[in-house]
Amino acid sequence: MSEKLEEVMRECPSEKSEDESWRQRSPSAANFAFTMRNAPPETTLGRHIARRLVEIGVKDVFHVPGDFNLLLLDELLAEPNLNLIGCCNELNAGYAADGYARCKGVGCVVVTFTVGGLSVINAIAGAYSENLPVICIVGGPNSNDYGTSRILHHTIGLPDFSQELRCFRTVTCCQVTVNDLHSAHELVDSAFAIAIRESKPVYISVSCNLPHICNPSFVPDLPFGPQTRISNQATLKAAVEAAAEFLNRSVKPVLVCGPRIRVAKAKKACIHFAQASGFLVAVMPSAKGLFPETYPKFIGTYWGAVSSPFALEIVESADAYIFVGPIFNDYSSVGYSLLLKKDKMLLVQPDRVTIGAGASYGCVVMTEFLGLLSERVRKNEVAYENYRRIYIPPGMVQKSLPNEPLRINVLFQYIQDMLNADTAVLAETGDSWFNCQKLKLPEGCGYEFQMQYGSIGWSVGATLGYAQAAQNKRVIACIGDGSFQVTCQDISTMIRQNQRSIIFLINNGGYTIEVEIHDGPYNTIKNWDYCGLIEAIRNGEGRVWTCRVRTEDELARAIEETNSEKNKHSLCFIEIMVHKDDTSKELLEWGSRVSAANSRMSQILAE
């Protein structure tokens, strides 16, 4: 028996009670009953969950209350190191946990059974696709209802409580149902550990009648240590030797970083390898912000036909490219149009290395591999020297004429000037992807967008979560009007939390990214009075400043006002009025290629 458990047992009363005779007949059961009845409040299931959240780095929990999770919320509230943030709906609460996890490394959302769970599941699917450890906790049915034929509310009217869990099975890496205190400690701890190890969301259902009940297994300060991945040393050594030989015989190798370096916690390892190898460095679009853009040999984004200037030519003409943590899909490959050759590629994933069209080495941890490879690779700066020879700086954006309608490229020139180490950029799905991709991030400036899942509306909740996690930074969010209409309610939560983000609402009258893939009347939306909406949500409470701009002069004055003494601690909302056809050239190119990929003829019809 542990010292902590003995301490709890000693706190139980020693005086005789009316059921003394029963306790003598069954001492272990009686002692256990006394322990649970008299144990300190810190030993409840809910407090145990709260402590574990704090231990793994969660300080803020996003939630929507419902009758199945109320007792759990009470227990979470009792944890002094945990802050509960109520959201307007479950989808936004999930997006907020996603944004929080991007900054803090892990996030948490708490909802109620089925109606809440199936509402938040879209956000959890996005977190799964982006490799973010989000703890999704659902207040579940009373433990006494399991195994009965009872039909409960918040269900589809069947005596089957597993529907929600089955839905979460494909978008989480672990699913547990806590309806028994005796197994609760193991189930909760294992789910938390798996989330951290796999960098994926987990689903935990907690019966509504259990969170406030004490149990000796929930003794405070019991150690918790998530498992970490380790390499097979023989395989690691073989992979390093083969990779070093592959790279050292190449003439102009390049390094391309992908989004899974976040999963592998390999940012520092990538920088160290780049310095040791001398290779030119590019990033895939969804890895923007994961490698410092102030690095001398950084050349921008490799994104096929919409790459940064000259990045496409340099990467695809290399005789060896090492891709670290990539995700190749139809969006990142611009409709599968990348001209990469498998026999030239060294592919490094979080736990596997594949060299050319040949050997694949499993059980190889990315950070360990890059560290050892840094010692074996020969310095080679040929690709960077070639890049410097052909590089031509991009042209300057034309200054607007007096009273000329504001252009998108002018807007982002101003946003570029706003960036520093105390800011972070969140880009919504749409043309903001491409315009924000061209921003040059100063050292320490954060950057996030959701490329793999690409769910419109993600950025409103994600801005709430990221800003809550990174209170030392001012978040600059670029959101299209169509996306904003999906999730705008949680501007209310930003105001309640006294956040000071700057939101640029780009009003061009519709779903511009869809227009460039395939146009139709369904891509046009009803225009709103967005500034009026924000003022209505504010309802006279909180620090909020709104503005609508139509020209460059108005934009300059608006940005200056966001940093004024009056508004530098306020939520600032700037509605940008632009022409519906004002898009980046990259979106035009990308849209046509993705459209071509989407419209490929069926193989059956082709035959």
Image (spheres, rainbow, N blue to C red):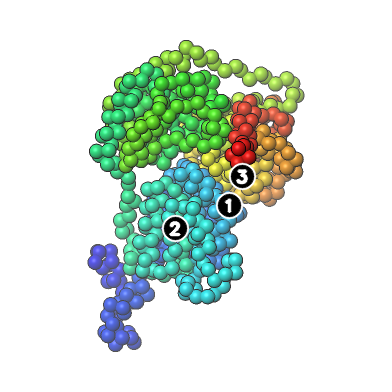
In the picture provided, is 463 more to the left or to the right than 282? Answer: right
Q: How far is mark 3 from mark 2, CA to CA?
A: 27 Å
Neighbour tally class for label 3: few under 14, some 14-19, many 20 plus, Cα within 10 Å: many
In-image side of 157 versus 316 (left or right)? right
Residue 603 vs residue 77: left or right?
right
Q: What x and y, as percent, mark residue 510?
A: 71, 39
Give the SS element for disc 2. Answer: strand
- Which sits earlier in the primary sequence, circle 1 or circle 2? 1
Tell me whether the residue at label 3 lies in contact with that at label 2, contact meaning CB atoms closer than 8 angstroms. Answer: no
Q: Amino acid at mark 3?
A: Gly
Q: Say how many tags the image has.
A: 3
Q: Rounded to the nearest whole Å, what is the CA distance between mark 1 and mark 3? A: 10 Å
Q: Earlier in the sequence, mark 3 or mark 2?
A: 2
Q: At which x and y percent is residue 342? A: 43, 29
Residue at the spot 75% in from the left edge and 40% down from the top edge? 521
Image coords of residue 567 (percent x, y): 61, 38
Residue drawn at the location 58% of the way across and 66% of the way down:
155
Say which residue label 3 marks. Answer: 457
| Residue denoted by label 1 | 91
Point 47% across, 37% down: residue: 327
The C terminus: image quadrant: top right
